[in-house]
């Protein structure tokens, strides 16, 4: 079988990253093909998660694989956080839409999420540590929020300038 076609990833500060995603209406062949393309794109970019927003599809769909073996796929369609631990921790985050930038973000250490899987079945996922952080980061993307928005305006503006400069240089080459 052919490998799924990769999708271009939007880069901060592209305003399309601030779009609020709408619910997926039906888990059909179109959505299943999009899931395969998103996993292929995420693995190719060595990421642990990818939200549909990042590939300019504004529907509530996320793919995740935090395993070292890269074979533990998690699909979240129309995810909703049912519970988030009051205990929080500040951890280093990165983002495929903000390449080369890593910084600390305070997140709940555990979450319980309800979502549909790729077959349309409703599932509950209890997550902690890296998976919990990744789920919160990806669900922020679906709300149009990029992790740099948690940083100070000074840091965020520096990152914005750096990204714009890098994008201009890449266009020139
Ligand atoms: O949403 C994304 O852009 C994917 C992002 C997910 C993420 C990483 C780290 C913390 C929270 C969410 C990435 O995969 S960034 C690249 C990456 O593989 C990575 C970066 C830092 C730690 C672990 C992995
Ligand atoms: Zn991200």
Image (cartoon, rainbow, N blue to C red):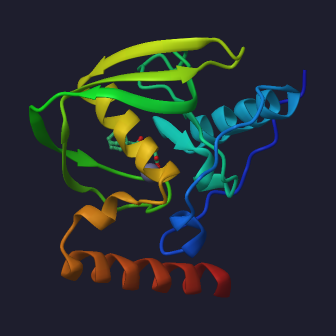
Percent x, y of residue 23: 64, 41
Q: Above or below — where is 13 with respect to 80?
A: below
Q: Is residue 16 left or right of residue 156?
A: right
**Location of residue 73 (image quadrant):** top right
Percent x, y of residue 112: 33, 21
Q: Quadrant of the N terminus?
A: top right
Q: Above or below — where is 149 with respect to 48?
A: below
Percent x, y of residue 132: 31, 29
Q: Tell me the residue at 64%/49% (across/down).
A: 22
Q: Is residue 66 left or right of residue 83?
A: right
Q: Is residue 33 left or right of residue 102?
A: right
Q: Tell me the residue at 58%/14% (across/down).
A: 122
Q: Nearer the viewer, residue 111 or 159?
A: 111
Q: Tell me the residue at 60%/52% (across/down).
A: 21
Q: Can you see residue 101?
A: yes
> Which residue in the rendered view is the most extreme toward the right?
1
Q: Quadrant of the C terminus?
A: bottom right
Q: Is residue 113 left or right of residue 102?
A: right
Q: Can you see residue 46?
A: no
């Amino acid at each position: 079988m052919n490998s799924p076609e990769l999708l271009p990833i939007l880069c901060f500060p592209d305003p399309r990253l601030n779009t609020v995603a709408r619910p997926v209406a039906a888990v059909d062949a179109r959505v299943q093909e999009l899931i395969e393309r998103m996993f292929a794109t995420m693995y190719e970019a060595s990421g642990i998660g990818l939200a549909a927003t990042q590939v300019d599809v504004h529907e509530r769909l996320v793919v995740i694989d935090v395993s070292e073996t890269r074979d533990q796929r998690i699909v979240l369609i129309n995810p909703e956080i049912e519970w988030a631990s009051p205990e929080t921790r500040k951890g280093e985050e990165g983002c495929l839409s903000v390449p080369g930038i890593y910084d600390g973000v305070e997140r709940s250490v555990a979450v319980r999420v309800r979502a549909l899987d790729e077959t349309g079945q409703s599932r509950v996922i209890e997550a902690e540590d890296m998976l919990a952080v990744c789920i919160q980061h990806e669900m922020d993307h679906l709300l149009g929020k990029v992790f740099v928005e948690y940083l100070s305006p000074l840091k965020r503006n520096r990152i914005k300038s750096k990204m714009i400069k890098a994008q201009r240089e890449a266009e020139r080459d």
